[in-house]
Amino acid sequence: MAADIRIVPCLSDNFGYLVHDPATGATASIDAPEAAPLIAALDKEGWKLTDILVTHHHGDHVGGIAELKAKYQCRVVAPHDANAKIADVDLRVEEGDVVKVGGLSARVLETPGHTLDHISYVFDDDRALFAADTLFSIGCGRVFEGTYPMMWESLLKLRELPDDFKLYCGHEYTASNVKFALTIEPDNAALQARAKQVEQQRAAGQPTIPVTLGEEKQANVFLRADVPSVAAAVGLAGESAADVFGEIRERKNNS
């Protein structure tokens, strides 16, 4: 039986997610930006939280854990880096581990760069990728703790997933990401189409997530640093994809 997934807006622009297994009643929250919206969503659905799957240690992803743990006595699953400041952790996981949420299975990918401890959760049977702040729609996270080559390798790992996977990311940044991406690839037809779609979604008060990885591979300039025309567009024709990616990320930082 397929997972039920709910998008829960949190804080100013974070996404929280609830992943529910109808067969067993188990429900996981992917990160916990803040408790109140997640509790309200759980109450609305009549679900009980059994797990919190943490992607990384930043406060806007872990701020609700303590309250949710106290209320539901749920299991907290977090990256293996014990130095990361994440409270109330019950289980630490690393690359290749599989986390069970009732009858659902989430495969762990280590995707460092934004932070060194960052992991992503892949629900293969449900064709769902929860990439938090590694990969956004038409964007990627700032590289705070890692290096540009490290982040590029993490993005390549996610890009290898099939086109029909749906991306669920950590923030509603798509409109600003589109605006920037068009400065690099103004003639990219897939990006132009995504720009129109995002404008309509935001005007209607709808989230721009989920989106398929196939769409992202065509329109997300951060996933396209190894495309010769992208390298040429930033004046780095013939240079390594990691260097091209770094130049694109620096331009976004300063945009």
Image (cartoon, grey):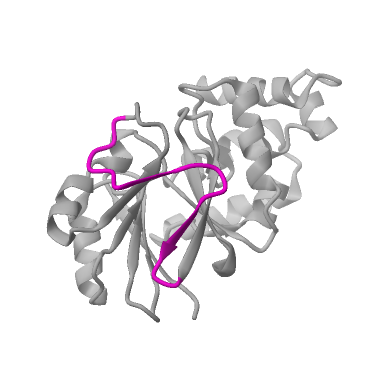
Which of the 4 quarters of the picture holds residue 220? top right
- Tell me which segment is drawn in magenta: 85-103
Relative to 238, residue 185 above or below: below
Q: In this view, does 202 lie to the left or right of 48?
A: right
Residue 255 appears anywhere in the view:
no
Is residue 239 rendered to the left or right of residue 6? right
Residue 168 in the image: state x and y as whole percent.
49, 54
Front residue of this view, candidates 144 and 124: 124
For the point 28% across and 55% down, the residue is 75
Q: Is the magenta stretch mostly helix, strand or loop?
A: loop
| Residue 119 visible in image | yes
Residue 43 located within the stretch drawn in magenta? no
Vertical placement of residue 186 versus 9, above or below: above
Residue at 57% x, 48% y is 96
Badge count: 0
Q: Quadrant of residue 46?
A: bottom left
Residue 97 among magenta residues: yes
Image location (x, y in percent) of residue 141 = 50, 34
Answer left or right for 171 relative to 231.
left
Give how far across and how far down residue 82 sits, in percent: 35, 31
Residue nearest the observer in this picture, 182 or 83: 83
On the image, the x and y values in percent for residue 74 come to 24, 58
Q: Residue at x 32, y 76 (%)?
A: 25
